[in-house]
Image (tube, coloured by chain):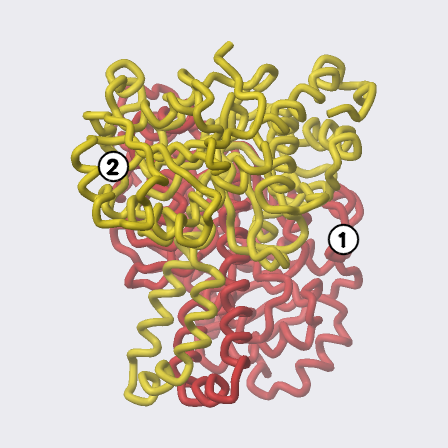
Chain colours: A yellow, B red
Amino acid sequence: MTAQPDHIKQTETGRIIISVDVMGGDLGPATVIAGLDASARENADIGFIAHGPKEEIEKLLSRRKRLVGRVVVRDARDVVAMGDKPSHVVRNGKNTSMWSALECVRTGEATVAVSCGNTGALMALSMIRLRKLPGVNRPAIAILFPSRNPQGFNLMLDAGADVRADARDLLQYAMMGASYARNGLSLRRPRVGLLNVGTEEHKGRSELKEAHDLIGLSASAADFDYVGFVEGSDIPGDAADVIVTDGFTGNIAIKTGEGTATLIGDLLRQAFRYTPLSRLAYLLALTSMRRLKQRIDPRRVNGGVFLGLNGTVVKSHGSADATGVSAAVRLAFQLAKSGFTEKLAARVASIAPLQQDTTEPPENGAA
Amino acid sequence: MTAQPDHIKQTETGRIIISVDVMGGDLGPATVIAGLDASARENADIGFIAHGPKEEIEKLLSRRKRLVGRVVVRDARDVVAMGDKPSHVVRNGKNTSMWSALECVRTGEATVAVSCGNTGALMALSMIRLRKLPGVNRPAIAILFPSRNPQGFNLMLDAGADVRADARDLLQYAMMGASYARNGLSLRRPRVGLLNVGTEEHKGRSELKEAHDLIGLSASAADFDYVGFVEGSDIPGDAADVIVTDGFTGNIAIKTGEGTATLIGDLLRQAFRYTPLSRLAYLLALTSMRRLKQRIDPRRVNGGVFLGLNGTVVKSHGSADATGVSAAVRLAFQLAKSGFTEKLAARVASIAPLQQDTTEPPENGAA
C-alpha cells in the first residue's frame, strides 16, 4: 500500500493544492500556465505544484503576477510525448513531468493531479504509482457529455480505461460514478443508468443482465437512484445523470457523439457562409450562437477523471487551451475540496460484502 | 432451402416490383400509401405489392390516381404491433401484413420488401421465412449515417441485428457492407473500416485483431479497400465509407450520434428564439438552415437494410412520414434493380474458402 492522505490537503495559507503536469499538452506549457493563471484569478483558495523543466516554467511564471506565491515548481527534465507507448513510459519515465505530478499525489502533497498528456501513459503510470483502491478490479475514466439535464451534462464511465468490464466491474463503475456526481457535480442523489441496446429487461448481453441486478440491489444503500437500462440516445438525454458502460462501448459512443457535434458545427458554419443574406443572419444571431456554442463547448466540461485509484487524476484534453485547462483545474479543485478520494474509497469498501455474495444485499448501508 | 429468384423481378410492364408492408408504422397506412405515391411520381419503373386489410388499402388507393395500375393489393387482416414480442409474431403472425410482405420475397414475386414495423419482429420473421444465405452466420442491419464524405453519408453495420459478432462475422459484415455500398450507393470501390477504440494495431479486443487480419486478406479479392481500424468519430467522418462493428456497439454508437444531433437541433431552435434579433436572424437564414437540415435529415437516408438473407428487407423508421417511406422505397428499388440479392449471395459464397482456413487467402477472386 502507498501512503494515504487522510484529510484534505491544504497549505499553511489554507489553500487547496493541485499537482499539475505542465508539459505534454498539444499547445505547450505556456497554455497550461495561462490556464493556471485563469484559475487563480477566479479562485483565491487554490495553489499549485507545477511539474516540468524548472527554468522554462519559472520564465513563464515571471510574466504572471497573479501566480506569485501560488505555485511551487518541481523540476522534471523529461516529457512524455503523445506517441510514447505506455509500457515505455512506465519503464523509463521516472524523470518526466507526468511521473513527478503523480508522485505528489502518491506522497500526499496533493490529492488531485491534472495532466494534458498522453492518456494511455497517464493511466498506466497512475495504476503503477498510485495503485488501485482496495477492492477495485478495473479503474475507469469518467467524462462529461453535454445533455438535456439541468446541470447541462451527464457523466459517463468507462470512457476507455479498459476495453473489458464484467458485471462486478460495472457495479463498481456505478458506485464510483455516483460518488463523483455527488462530490464533483453536487448532485445529491444521482440517477444511474446502465447502457444497453434497449430498455427492456430481456435485451442485451448476459453480463449486462447480471450487472442490472447487482446495481439494482446496491442503489439504495449507496444513495443513488438506479433507473435501469438506458440507450445511446440517453447519453445526451435526461433519463439519467450517470451512464455506466464498458470502456470499449463508452469510448466509441463518446467519439461518435463528439464527431457528430463537430460535423453539425462545421455544416452550420458553411450554411451561414452560403449567401450574403445568411452572412447577415449570422451577425444578427451571433449572441445566440455563442450561447449555444458555450452550452455544448467541450472545453467547458474538460476533464476525464480516473476513478478507482489511491488518489484522483484529472486528464485534461490534449488540445485544451487556457479555458480548457482552467476547467480541468476547477474540477480538480472541487474534487479535492470535497475530500472525494477518501469518500470514494469508503464507497468502494462498502460494496465488498455484496461482491462476495451476489445473492444477498449488503448487510448495511455503511460508508 | 427456399425458392430463389434467379433474376431481377419485373412485371410484364417492365416495372420492378417492391413488396410493401403497409401496416405497422407509427403514422398509419395513409402515410405509407402517400410515400408510395411520391415514389411512383419520381420513378415510372416501379410497381408495388401492398400488404394489409384489403378494403382499407383500396380505399386509400382510390384517392391516388397516380397509383392506378401500379399497386397489387394482398389482403392481410392482422398487424404486428410495435410492442409485440418477436417470438410471439413468429408463432402467431401468419395473417399479418408483415408476414405477407416477406412471403412475396420468399416466393420470388419481389426481391426486396419494405416495412415500417417492429424491427425485432421483422428480423425474426425474416430469419425464419427467408432464411440465412448459405455461409452466413449472423445477418446484419446496415444503416446510413450523415458524414463528411462526398456521398453525404456512411454505411454502418451491424446496427443491432445481433449483440455478438466474432471475427468471421465481422469479415462477413465487411463483405456484405461493401457489396451494399457498391450496389445501393453506387460506390465503385468502397473503403471499409473496422470500428475500434484507436487506430493503432495493438489496440482493442482480441476478436478485432483477428478480424483486422481476415478483412485485410479479403479486401483486394472482394474489390474494396480496407483502411484498417477506425474510431467513433469516423462514423460521421470521411476516413471510410463502410464502418464494420458488432450490433451492440453499432446500436449504441448510432443512437448516441442521433441523440447528439437532436439535442443540438433543439438547442439551435432555442437559440434562434431567444431574442427578437435572433428571430429575425432565423428568417434571414431560413434557406441556409433548410439546406443544413436536409443535409443531416435522417428521413433522406431512411432505411436499415437486412443483409445476409435469401432476399433483401428494407426496414423504414417506425415514425417515417411520406418522405421517409419514399426514401426507403427508392433504396429498395435501387437494390432490386442492381440484382443486389444475387450479387451479395455470390460475394458471401466467395469467402467460404477463406472462412475454412484463415491462414490462406481465397484461391481466386471469383464472384
Q: Position of residue A97 (x, y in %)?
A: 28, 28
Spot the residue most to the front.
A12
Q: Quadrant of residue A155?
A: top right
Which residue is nearer to you in this view: B360 or B144?
B144
The label on residue A10 is none
Secondary structure beneath dot 1 equals: loop
Residue beneath the point at 42% across and 52% down: A258
Q: Is residue A171 above or below residue A91?
A: below
Relative to A61, B241 lies left or right: right
Q: Position of residue A339 (x, y in %)?
A: 59, 32
Alpha carbons under labels 1 and 2: distance apart: 43 Å
Residue at numbered disc 2: B221
Looking at the rendered structure, the kind of residue marked 2 is: Ala
Residue beneath the point at 53% across and 21% down: A5
Relative to B46, B114 lies left or right: right
Looking at the rendered structure, the kind of residue marked 1 is: Gly
Q: Is residue A233 visible?
A: yes
Dividing the image into 4 quarters, which one contains the N terminus of chain B?
Answer: top right
Q: Is residue A177 above or below residue B145?
A: above
Q: Is residue B135 visible?
A: no
Q: Position of residue A224 (x, y in %)?
A: 73, 39
Residue at numbered disc 1: B83
Residue beneath the point at 58% across and 21% down: A6
The 10 Å Cα crowd at callout 1, few under 14, some 14 to 19, many 20 or more, is few
Dividing the image into 4 quarters, which one contains the C terminus of chain B?
Answer: top left
Question: What subunit carries mark 2?
Answer: B
